[in-house]
Amino acid sequence: MNRRDFLTRSSAAVLAVSLSPNLSPLAAAEPAAAATPVSLTYPFALEPLPYAYNALEPHIDEATMKLHHDKHHLAYITNLNAALKDHPELHTLTVEQLLRKLADLPPTIQTAVRNHGGGHLNHRFFWHIMRAPGVEGAGAEPKGELAAAIVAEWGSVEKMKTAFNDAATKVFGSGWAFIEADVKTKKLSIATKPNQDSELFSADRVGLLACDVWEHAYYLNYQNRRADYLKAWWNVVAWDVVARNYAAAKA
Ligand code: MN3
């Protein structure tokens, strides 16, 4: 397998994991999931949420989820498609591939692909690492290999959450916080990005978890209290999906 194949395969594996909460770890490790029900290339399309709009209440309210998914995420997709419309040579590329070669894209569309491609990638991932609290362990503690890696890095799950929330609180303006694993060492780390810049297309790191700290993600319910949103958000983290993302972090 050459490097390009690897990049494509690893990207598809992560996507399959993040999009398919019911896949077994074995199935998730096989990226040739023909049934992946999304358009992975142009024209990109908005998939329904994998749960009801009110499923994440009381931590994330229904009105926020409707606006966030139906309006904000859709707008990223619409704008990404518009940017790519007149560039058929790019229509076979996934959003991860577009972002990896951003500097090689026509200069006139680089900003649009960065912002709206990143927005599409981040949100597509974000919906799938959340689930109704209490359902299949959402909001409970991580287990197994993932829990061990968290303890090795931060000392405890609580300390990891404190470090993550601290980093996410300090994102100035709009942006994202991520936990990612180095594909070679499987070492975990926290990263933050401004705007819709993404950590989810790197060839060296696999994103396990992402939290949207744009005000549109929490303002209706939490107003300016980002720290309260972050504290509540852990109640809807689907740790089994995060664990499968970690299992997929292989060099
Ligand atoms: Mn958002």
Image (tube, helix red, strand yellow):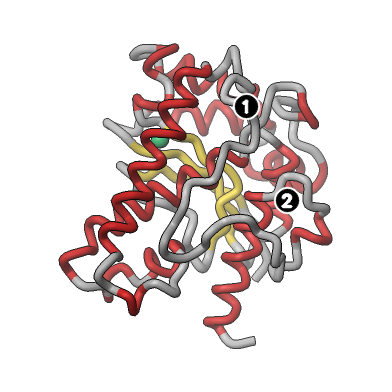
Mark 2–mark 1 Cα distance, whole angstroms, equals 23 Å
Q: Secondary structure at mark 2?
A: helix
> Label 2 crowding class (10 Å Cα cut-off): few <14, some 14-19, many 20+?
many
Q: Where residue 232 is drawn, which disc sits there?
A: none
Q: Residue at left 46%, top 46%?
A: 122
Residue 24: horizontal and vertical position, in percent?
Answer: 83, 53
Q: Where does label 2 land, which residue? A: 244
Q: Residue at left 63%, top 50%?
A: 18
Up/down of 134 relative to 105, above or below: above
Left or right for 48, reference 244:
left
Q: Earlier in the sequence, mark 2 or mark 1?
A: 1
Choose top left, top right, bottom left or bottom right for residue 176: top left
Depth check, mark 2 against mark 1: the one in front is: 1
Up/down of 109 relative to 129, above or below: below
> Label 1 crowding class (10 Å Cα cut-off): few <14, some 14-19, many 20+?
few
Up/down of 36 relative to 189, above or below: below
The outermost residue toward the left is: 108
Tell me if the residue at label 1 has its CB under 8 Å from ligand 1: no
Q: Residue at left 39%, top 14%?
A: 220
Give the residue type at disc 2.
Arg
Q: Where does label 1 land, which residue? A: 52
Q: Which image quarter is the N terminus in?
A: bottom right
Q: Secondary structure at mark 1?
A: loop
Residue 127: horizontal and vertical position, in percent?
Answer: 56, 38
Give the residue type at disc 1.
Ala
